[in-house]
Amino acid sequence: MERPESISDPAAGVLTGNDLWHSPEERLNDQDKLYEFLEVLSAYRLAMNTINWDQTVSGAPAAGVGFRSKGYGVLTREHYRFLMAPEFRALLEKFSLEGGTLEGDIAKEWLIELNRIEKIPKDDYTEFMTYLSKSEVEWEEAKRTGDFEGFKSHYKIIFDTARKFSEYIGYDQHPYDAWIEMFEPGMTVEKLDRFFGELRAEIVPLLSGIREKLSVNPQRYDFLARAIPKEKQEAFSGRLLEVIGFDLSRGFLRESEHPFTNAMSIDDVRMTTHYYEREFISSIFSVLHEGGHGIYEQNVDRMLANTGLDGGASSAVHESQSRMFENAFGRSKAFWTKLYGEMQAEFSPALDDIPLEEFIEAINRVESTLIRIEADELTYSLHIMVRYELEKAIFEGSLEIEDLPEAWNRLMREYLGVEPAHHGEGILQDVHWAAGLIGYFPSYALGNAYASQLLHFMKQEVDVERSLRALDFGDILEWLTLHVHSHGKRLKPEKLIEAATGTPFDPWYYIQDLKTKYQERYGI
Ligand code: ZN
């Protein structure tokens, strides 16, 4: 694996150790202190992540939720205290002046977070974190019963707090910007309005054209609802992860209500999926999706481990990897050419009478549906657009929480032509808001667009079709590791995309991909 290059800017004037420390020993001493702080911080992160995992995956007793959230609250408080220690800040400020060193980059990254957190009063911050660990648990029940009335007070508190935090953190133009920036540095409402505007203009008419065609000539996919026992799906999930190159000695897959990836460290990457007996492809695409996230986490340069520069460059760059594995690879005919026979054998006799061609048609069909995580490649970004517009409207104060379900249903009708009968498959379907992940949704759509651009340029150097056909991800992973994964957070999203592809981010690649694929498939 090639090491990322130092990101110093010589024109900015590079300070060296000699300018900041009296002797090399003094710098070394400070360096040790810096890494000691980072070690403690990652231990806190490990403890908090473990509690989350325990709660959402391991089935910790519901009766103990109060005790666990209290413990979580204590850890959050102590983590905060440690993070805000004046000695830590002093070290960061010193190292942040250094150019071209790993410690300099680490310090700059932590200062961004520190400066943001410092603007939020400590009590507000810990109270919010504790609140979220409870609301996330209650959301599961609300989603199951579709009880928006019972859950809306949580949304009210969460969005009111988010709005208040925006004021604390500060923003240039739009209060929502403060939250978008947390997940996608450099992104703003202004840029997203333009991005979604282009998508809306191209995809909404394309989708209605396809729906018209389908109303005359419907596609067959009933076989996707044939029952496949969970154990068989589980076995095949393991095979999928092996094929795409996820290192199963440094991570694993379990089951939860909502699929997700939790990277405790480079060597402990945990993922979940959800098995539905009568919808086996749901888990297949979840596994490929989370597998894309997991592989990213595993392939970050080891020297960045536990420094705060590990993990992805941003949520959208992370999503570009999961969506690439899920859609560009996982829905291609090349990928299934060999693998389909294996799956037929594993699931036999369920798919014995279905030829490969028919399976490929079915997994690439376009259908306006209600559930985001099961949406096809074309309609997916429309689901995101609905959420983006609602979040934006709440921040602007033009939409009340009370009116969320109605606004949701109206936008779903407008963009996708469908409307939920039950809030569990409508406004309550995603965990994000209950978990405080506001401003995260746009990352999914941006991720799709980044994936298209990255793939376009990867194909100039890698025979992707051949690799997929051979189920040999070696060249693909080498390209991704070199250009995306290894850098961790060391390159900011805009820089990463430009460095990897030689050109600034442009949604054109994504829109072209979708138009070419679906106009051809549906003869429009
Ligand atoms: Zn994802």
Image (spheres, rainbow, N blue to C red):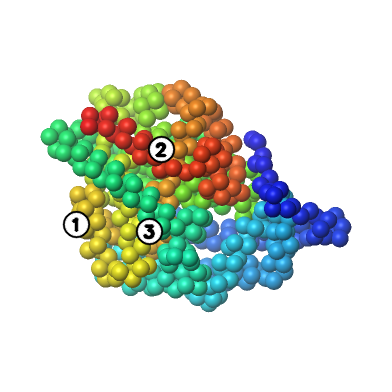
Which label lies toward us, 2 or 1?
2
Residue 496 pos. (x, y %): 55, 44
Q: Is 9 in front, or is 215?
A: 9
Label at residue 217: none
462 vs 421, left or right, is right
Which residue is drawn at the image coordinates 51% and 39% (left, top)? 503
CA gap between label 2 and label 3 equals 30 Å
Which label lies toward us, 2 or 3?
2
Residue 462 pos. (x, y %): 51, 26
Q: Up-down: is 302 above or below 145?
A: above
Local secondary structure at mark 3: loop
The N terminus appears in which quarter of the rendering?
Answer: top right
Residue that label 3 marks: 431
* First in residue order: circle 2 vs circle 1: 1
Which residue is drawn at the image coordinates 50% and 27% (left, top)? 460
237 vs 86, left or right, is left
Local secondary structure at mark 1: loop
- Amino acid carrying mark 2 in the image: Tyr
Residue that label 2 marks: 509
Label at residue 421: 1
